Structure formats: structure tokens, C-alpha cells
Image (tube, helix red, strand yellow):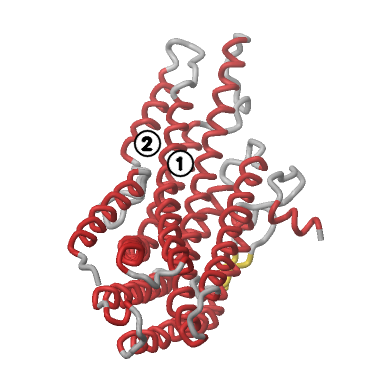
Amino acid sequence: MFPVLRQYFSPFAKRSEELSLLQIFKPLYIVLSVLGLIPCSIEFPKGKLDCIILHRSAFNHSLCALFTLLTVYIFFGLHVHQVLTSHEENAFADDKMAKTNYIIELVTQCLFCTSAYFCAFQRKNLYVSMFREVTRSWDDLPYVNRGIILGRLRVKVNCVVFGSLLLILITLTAVTYAGSTNLWKRILITLSFNVPEMIQFTVVAFYFVFVLMVVALLKNVEDHCKMFTKARRSIKNNSYKVESGRIPVTLSHMQSVYVKALRIKRQINVAFQAPILFSLLQCFHTMVSESYDICQGLLYQDDFSSHNLIECSYWVILQLLKIYALAHSGTLLKKEALRIGRTIHNIPSIDDDEIKLFLEIQHFSTLMTFQDTEITIFGYFPLEAPLMFNMIAAAAMYLIILVQFAKAK
């Protein structure tokens, strides 16, 4: 039992442990397969073996995707019908703006689910290419102890990312079923709000884990650059000449892996930018509408309960978590690329006339300048740290405008 838990949750990877980069992705892959968010099955071999794509399994994954989408669409229609025909004696039933915002939230959830599944199956070959490219690029630089990188990545993926998904699922269910609404309304909320929200978090987690794997590739390049620098300094201090085999990997080899890592980054950008766009649209609208409901409830409604306040606040927090994950991913990539740049500029030259090494460093630096590390949404805006500030500031501005024009009931 303990070896199995260690294989997926331990931060320490032994040298004898045949752990590959893609194996860390396995727990999240199971969730994606159940929801039909991945177009085909993958086998995760141990050691330095390429991942195996099972194309014949695409039919089963398509059935999972179709069943999930049909469930969301059917209960979306039932929920909209229930909202439009509701005759409950409360402020919500008479507030046209509240009803409109509620329906728009449902629509944005459905739009995201549609775009996520459509992109997953339309870009099936791109997904397959990303998986294979990650596996091969990781094994291109095997000359340092990569267990530390894999151990830390394993904790981030299986404990932080996967654990966060489980925690969100539990708390979302608890908040939904802790209220005083009838059972049918809770079922509608679960299948037309909670399920799409969990699908959205799963897609964001899928994207974030892929970015973490690219960051791990760049970290591996950085470690090899440090090894190269250390070897050069050792040779320089002992007044030795560079001998063949003394430094097992060349700067051009590291540059090649860096280019492959950024090619994977561009593939991730293409594969996920449409779902992320709809996710950010849904996040923005939900933050504004839920905050507006809180203001209206606290200012003008006598029956606004503490559960309503907690539920609305919780949904705002969920949107902030998604925005933070998306913004943090781009920051991680940029920071790791900057670390590589600083490392290669610290490589010492042994002889003053060693022009070849100087030209290699210059070429690597120039390549880093033109190989952009940003992940953008159709080129309009990057996923970086300022994204969270911009989203919150814009939502606050719209909320102020809505509150100023609101009328007391």
C-alpha cells in the first residue's frame, strides 16, 4: 500500500525509481477520461519509453463526452424553464436583472463546456503530439539527478492540484445541499451549475499541469546549464583544457531542448486558448453578478440569509482561484526562462580567444529573445500576474455602476 502511495504522492524520487515525467499526470488523466475530456487512452510505461496512444479507445472517450454534455444540456434547459416559470414569493422572482444574470451564468457555463469538448476532439492530434513531445524532450537531457524535479512536480500535481479538485468538489456539494431549497432545485443546481464548474476546474487543472511539465523541462535545462557552468569553472581553476567527454552535454544540445519545450508551450496555447477565453468570460460575469446579489441582499432584502451570503461569496472565491491558476501559469514560465538566461550568461570562458563558446551563448540568448514564453489568448492578452488585478479591477468597476443604478425594492 505504502509503495503505491509513494509512487504518486512522495516528494522524493529515488535514483532507482523508474519515474517518468508523464507518469505524474496519471491521477488527473483518470479524471479527464471519466469526464471524456481527453480524446483517447494513454499507457504510461516506466523508464525511458515513449507513451503509448491507444487510438481505438477514442470511441469510448467520445461516449463519455457525449453523455456528460447531454446531461449538462438537458438540465440546463430544465433549469432555465424553472427560473422563467418560477412563482415563488421572494425578491428573486420579481427581479428581472437577477433572473437575467442567473440565466447568463447558466449560458456561460454551457458555452465553456461546449468549447472544451469541441477543442479536445477537434485538436486530438495536437494533444497526442504534446504528450509524445513532453516524454521525448524529458529524456533528451538525462545527465543530472532529475528526481528532485520530478519529486517536487509530483507534489504539485497530485497533492496541490488534484487535492484542490477534491476539496472544491466536497465544499461545492456541501454549500449546495446546506441550504433550505427543495430537493429538485438542488438537483438542478448540481447538474447545471456544479458539474460544469467542476468540468471547468478540471480543464484548468489539465492546462496548469501541462504548463508545470513544460516548466519542469525548462528546469532540467537550467540544471544542465548549471552543471555545464560548474564543469567549466572546474576546468578553468585547474588550468585544464576542455577534453572530449569531460562535459557530457553541449550548450547547443540544451538549446535544442529549450526550443522543444517552447514548441510544446505553443501547442498548449493553441489547444487551450478557446476554453480559457470562455472560462475567463464566465469568471468575470460570475464575479460581478454574485457580488451584485450580495450587495442587493444586504442593502434591500430582509430575507437574505447567511447561507445566501456564504454561497455567493464562495462562488466569487472559486472564480478568483481559476483566475489565479491561469495567471500563475504564465508567471512560472517566464521566471524559469529568466533563470536559464542568467545561468548561461554566467558560463566562464577558459581562454580569452574561445570564440566558439561565446558565439553559442550569444546564439542561445538571441533565440531566447525571439522564442516568446508568453501564453496569450488569441494574441489579445497574456496569462500573467497582472491578469488577476485587471479582472478584479474591471469587475469592481462594473459592480459600482450596477449598484449605483440599482433601485431599492
| Rendering coords of residue 243 (x, y %) | 60, 21
| Residue sitting at x 62%, y 28% | 245
Q: Secondary structure at mark 1?
A: helix
| Whether residue 225 can be seen here | yes
Q: Residues within 10 Å of mark 2 (few under 14, many from 20)?
A: some
Q: Which residue is mark 1?
A: 258
| Rendering coords of residue 22 (x, y %) | 59, 56
| Rendering coords of residue 337 (x, y %) | 43, 37
| Whether residue 282 can be seen here | no
Mark 2 in CB contact with mark 1 (< 8 angstroms): yes
| Residue sitting at x 43%, y 75% | 193
Q: In the rendered structure, which amino acid carries the disc numbered 1?
A: Tyr
Q: Quadrant of residue 318?
A: bottom left
Q: Quadrant of residue 226?
A: top right
The quarter of the picture where the N terminus appears is bottom right
Rounded to the nearest angstrom, the CA distance separating label 2 from label 1 is 9 Å
Q: Which residue is mark 2?
A: 368
| Residue sitting at x 68%, y 46% | 11
